[in-house]
Image: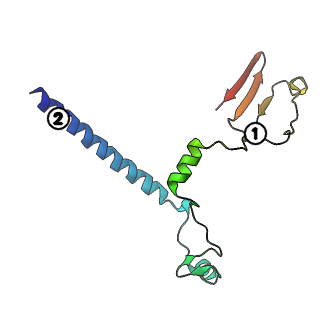
Amino acid sequence: MKTKHKAKGVFRFLKWSALTLVVLIGLITSYMMHPQFGKRPSGERLKRIQQSKQFKDGKFRNNSPTPQLTQSWTVAFSDYFFKRSAETSPKHKIPSVPVDWDSLLPNPMVWSGWGTPPICYVQTGKLSLSIQY
């Protein structure tokens, strides 16, 4: 009797998981069809595209071959995970400018830029925060 109940529970879980997956795929697909993501060229734009030298057989063609993988995926995988690169540190000193925190405004907010990980330094009154997001 217990195995029947467990089988029903597993079947119910699989059914709801599949339904959730189908709904999620449907929502993502309908979202990606929004005009903000572009549309097929038509009219004057299509004519201009078709007159391009790279447009052949209904597609743009590169002048030189551009493979997505220059080696087999197994070699790429093993190189990525197991080979050590000689270029792991810079060959010369990277210039930097030290920040004089005292010369900043009374309530400074400093962003470290596009570095990884991004860090934001905020100081208000006696509270100083360094936020990594």
Decide which of 103, 51 is in the foreground and name it.
Answer: 51
Q: Amino acid at mark 1?
A: Ser
Q: Note whether 33 is above or below 113 in the view shown.
A: below
Instruction: Determine the CA span between mark 2 and mark 1.
Output: 55 Å
Within the image, what quadrant is residue 15 found in? top left
- Quadrant in which residue 37 is drawn: bottom right
The residue sitting at 81% across, 25% down in the picture is: 107
Q: Examine the rendered structure and indicate whether residue 48 appears above or below residue 125.
A: below
Image disc number at residue 7: 2
Q: Is 128 or 5 nearer to us in this picture?
A: 5
Q: Residue at x 58, y 79 (%)?
A: 46
Residue denoted by label 1: 89
Q: Is residue 36 left or right of residue 93?
A: left
The residue shown at (47%, 54%) is 31
CA neighbours of label 2 inside 10 A, class few (<14), some (14 to 19), many (20+): few
Image quadrant assignment for residue 108? top right
Left or right? Give the position of 107 relative to 80.
right
The amino acid type found where label 2 is placed reads: Ala
Disc 2 secondary structure class:
helix
